[in-house]
Image (tube, rainbow, N blue to C red):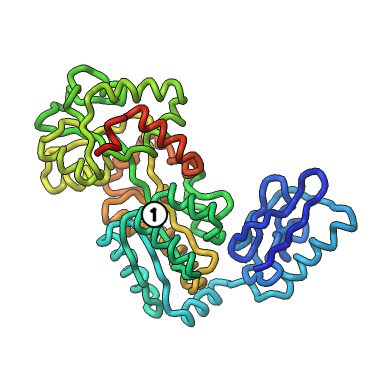
Amino acid sequence: MSFLRKSFPQGHAFRSQPMGHCLEVADSVIPGFCLSEPARFYVCDLQACPFGQTSHCSRRSKHSWSFPRNRLLLVLLAILSCASAKPAPAAENLLDGAKKEGRVVWYTSLAIDHATRVANAFSEKFAFIKVDLWRAGTGQVLTKILAEARANRYPDVTTMSDLEIHIMKEKGLFGAYFSPEREAIPQGFKDKEGYWTNFYDNIQVIAYNTKLVPADRAPKNYQDLLHPQWKGRMGMDSDEVAWVANMLRILGKEKGADFMRRLNAQNITFRNGHTLLAQLLAAGEISICVVCYNYRIEGMKLRGAPVEWVGGEPIIAEQHPLALFARAPHPHAARLFVDFSLSKEGGQKVMQEVNRVPARRDVEPSPPRLTRGLKIYPSDPTLANHQPEILKQYQELFPAALGR
């Protein structure tokens, strides 16, 4: 697609990265335009702007702007582009379009049984749409998407860890979509430019074996893990690069690095994967899991495993956003799927039913203690911009980890 590209005085400019059918509007660029709000601008693709409402454009601005006359023509061209495009997709038009498409393709790293529940619930409500689900680990999903993109093939929607979502955002693979359900998602858990919205969280906590660690002696926070009694008794996933980077971001680089060095001196047992680590914890091969997902520990408790968790601050929520592809082959069905997945009675209810942590804060997880009363920090997807640096730092702090 060809996009409007023009610089304006005093640093005001269009950016050329696509956001679905509209151009991204950065902080120091022309605000967006919509016909329903003549004092505001959305900078639209000159070839297509079928979503001419504020909820589908890249970003709205609360400020009024004026331009020299010789610059105004470019803005008017963008306005006429939107004005001559298809009408905005009201709810009934979205449904009509989705019915004609009849299909949505979803690539995800969500556990297959949970993803299947979401797909079935969607198909139950919208029987005229088939969900083509493909599930693999985050790394495999990312590799598949990037490989197919080189061949100009795309799914409609994806869900995976936030770092990988950010990588694809930076590559321009996503289109912005401001789902009406986004309002219920807290700040920090949705991309301000509309590229992605969080679907569910993995809350990272300390866990312990209740047979090996009495409740009154269990660690209450991360500093407690530095006590000599835990030396040689703790386990940790060998790939906690993102967790360490987020901890250093929250604690401060110097303070955080000092804690991590002292933690490493506790002779940590490193293993690959959080699932394996939780199993080793339940089997008594380790007494404490440094970073486990609390939903998984709760599920194991229900099945009789001798495990428990504590929410020692800082508690990080590993985000798993939904994102819609700019070249989604079934754009109407894709938007309908995103809306459903983020809705209180749709995908968020399914996350609650499978004991996951829904992204919406008006849908409590089951059990509620997974989030109730906890101060939770969202993971930072932009850490993906600093991969070489944070990987090097992780190797220095935990030299034995990545050798596993």
In which quarter of the view is residue 45 placed? bottom right
Closer to the camera, 240 or 216?
240
Closer to the camera, 111 or 369?
111
Residue farthest top in this picture: 228
Question: Relative to 200, is 382 on the left or the right?
Answer: right
In which quarter of the view is residue 102 placed? bottom left
User: Residue 91: x, y in percent?
Assistant: 54, 72
Instruction: Identify which residue is drawn at 40% across, 37% down.
Output: 391
Question: Relative to 38, is 93 on the left or the right?
Answer: left
Query: What is the quadrant of the N terminus in the image?
Result: bottom right
Q: Is residue 100 above or below residue 89?
A: below
Instruction: Identify which residue is drawn at 43% across, 26% down.
Output: 251
- Residue to which mark 1 is pinned: 160
Question: Relative to 212, is 110 on the left or the right?
Answer: right
Query: Is there any visible trace of residue 387 in the rendered image?
Result: yes
User: Residue 96: x, y in percent?
Assistant: 51, 80
User: Residue 400: x, y in percent?
Assistant: 27, 31
Secondary element at image label 1? loop
User: Residue 321: x, y in percent?
Assistant: 43, 53
Instruction: Identify which residue is drawn at 25% across, 45% down.
Output: 273
Q: Is residue 247 above or below residue 371?
A: above
Instruction: Identify which residue is drawn at 56% across, 59% down.
Output: 176
Amino acid type of the residue tagged 1 in the rendering:
Met
Query: Is there any visible trace of residue 363 in the rendered image?
Result: no
